[in-house]
Every structure is written in structure tokens, then in C-alpha cells.
Image (spheres, helix red, strand yellow):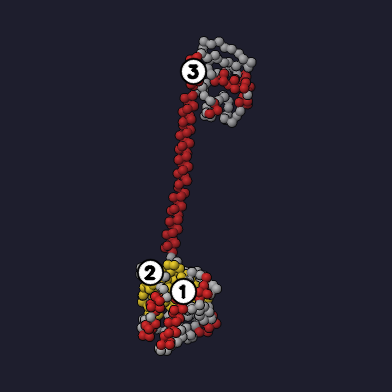
Amino acid sequence: MGQILSNLWRKICPKPKNEALKSDNHKANYQKLSHNDENQRQSHCINISDHHDVQLISGCSSPNETIESHENNLDHSNNSNIVVDLSSGYEEHAKKKKTFKEQLLKDHVDQVIPEAVLVKNVTTTISHVVSSVKKIGQYNSAQRILLVGEGDFSFSACLAVAFGTATNITATSLNSEDFLIKNYGKFISNKVELVTRGSTVLHDVDAMKMAKHPLVGSLVFDRIIYNFPHSGKFGKDDDDIRTHKKLVRGFIRNAKKMINEDGEIHITSKSNGIYLKWDIPKIGVDQGLNLIQEIKFKASKYPGYHTKYGFGGDKDFDCNPSKTYKFALSSKSNV
């Protein structure tokens, strides 16, 4: 290796015209440098291993080729003078360095563009999701909804049809499925609407104990709805009124445990006559809830909804006038 490097050194350093040629064992030309020439050599000769852009040996096809592979060329070359153009080497090196920088910038841009595209796609997706949320009355398809005390399940079926899906709906009744089949002519078709659209339909669910139900009690909802709660007492004395109030109170106690922090509990009831004595707003406040809104209930906003007595009979009852009382765990602006 030492001999090879020696040969290479003599090849690179040019010979002054006034110096006599000498031969070494390999008969390669070399030169004896003066003091000035030595300084010139030190200032212009380069460390070849640090500059891969300079063609080291005539005939090398790549920097990876070894010097040993060209030993014969060094030993037998008649034209052994090799010119190393340092300026062109530096220019080439600078050019490649610039090209590398441009490529680096290009690669950086290439990495940014997909992120921009991703943001655009995410924004488009979010816009699509928002635009696909469907609403009817006070409710929409993005809410997790629990319905309690359903009669023929026409209200929950109405929501399912309006949303186009019922995967966000859990509909329950106090009565058994057999009872509903015998007493409500449209119960089966309403249940089919719900089940085929992905709803959970449950029976024998007591509103006053639902927080302990093995399935319903383990869920959290954005809206819990109880339309026209009724204890089955049709008298007007204080005992009957207390029975109705007890039902509402028990429902609220359970619903509080199942509602989302920002959720709402809705109770719809007639708002005239004996029903005013129930004082539903006070019951809610006494249970630690905030009454955030009272709105008039209009059944016409819910196509297909039929009000049913909860204890038999397929006849609709008149629900006018009625109100929906909206409660929340904490105070918030009316909407």
C-alpha cells in the first residue's frame, strides 16, 4: 500500500521543467521541489480521500474502486502525468452541494404537502359529518338518546325515521312485549322500524329503578326523555297527585346518574288543570337539577307520533296544551 501511495503522490505533483527526471523501482516520473515549489505544493495539493468529486485515477469508474485495481496502470503508463483541476473540482463540489440543498428543500416541501392535504381531507370529513347530522324537534342524530315509558314506541320510531338511523337511540317501556303486542296495533311495525335501523329496544324497564338495570344503567346519555309520565291513577285527590309526583321524582333521581355532564333530562307533561299541581319544575330543582327551559310541546312536529295511555287501550289522548321541561346538571344558557 505504501508503494502505491508513493506512486500516486508522484503522479499528482507536477515536475518543474528544470529538474532532471529520475526513475524509481517502478520507473514512474517524480519531481524534486524547491522551497517555493514545496510551499506551492502544500497550498494546492489536496487530501484525495476527502474529495470524492475529483477523479483520482484515469479510468476509475467510481470512488469505490480500489487503488490496487489500477496498480498495473500506474506501473506501465507511458503518459503518467495526471492533471488535477482543483478549481473545477471545487466548482463541481459546490454545484453538488447546491443540488443537495435544493433536494433537501424539495424533500421538506414534499413532507409538508401531504400534511396540508391531510388537513384538507379532515376538514372535508368534519364538514361532511356536521352536514349529515339530522334533526327533528329538539333532537338530532348526534345525541345519545334514552326514551323511557314508551307506549306503542311511535315517538322513538318517529326519531329513527327522521334520523335515518337509530343506533343512537335506546327505547324502553315499563310494559312487557306481550302486553304491547296485545294492546297497540302499530307496536310491531314501530319496533321493526327501530330494530332494523339499529336501535336498542327493551321492555320491563322501571323508570324509578333504571339506574340499576344491567344494561341501561351502565350507559351514559346526552338526552333522557320521558313523555307524559303517569302513575295510572286518574283521581284528582292529593293521594293520586302524590303518586304522580313520586313517579317523576324517582325518574329524575335515576336519570341524574345516567346523564352526560352536558346532557339534558326532558319531561313532557300536560300543562293545564290538575297537571299543574304536579309542579314538575319544583321537583327537578329539589333534586338538584337546573331548569334551563320550558317550551310548548307540539305533537305535529313529530310525524307518526301517537299519544297512548300506558295501561291499555289503543286510543290516542289529547295532549294539548303541553310543555317540555328541560333540566340539566348545571346551569347553562337557554337554547
Residue 243 or residue 45, whichever sits in front: 243
Give whichever of discs 3 and 2 has the lower sequence position.
3
Q: CA distance from mark 3 to mark 2?
A: 89 Å
Q: CA distance from mark 3 to mark 1?
A: 95 Å
In which quadrant is the C terminus drawn?
Answer: bottom left
- Return the x and y of residue 66 as percentages of the image width and height: 61, 28
Tag in front: 3 or 2: 2
In which quadrant is the N terminus drawn?
Answer: top right
Residue at the spot 43% in from the left edge and 87% down from the top edge: 240
The residue carrying mark 3 is: 39
Residue at the spot 44% in from the left edge and 79% down from the top edge: 249
Q: Amino acid at mark 3?
A: Asn
Q: CA distance from mark 1 to mark 2?
A: 17 Å
The residue carrying mark 1 is: 255
Callout 1–callout 2 Cβ contact below 8 Å: no
The residue carrying mark 2 is: 331
| Mark 1 secondary-structure assignment | helix
| Res 38 label | none
Above or below: residue 92 compared with residue 32: below
Residue 142 or residue 249, whichever sits in front: 249
Give whichever of discs 3 and 1 has the lower sequence position.
3
How many marks on residues? 3
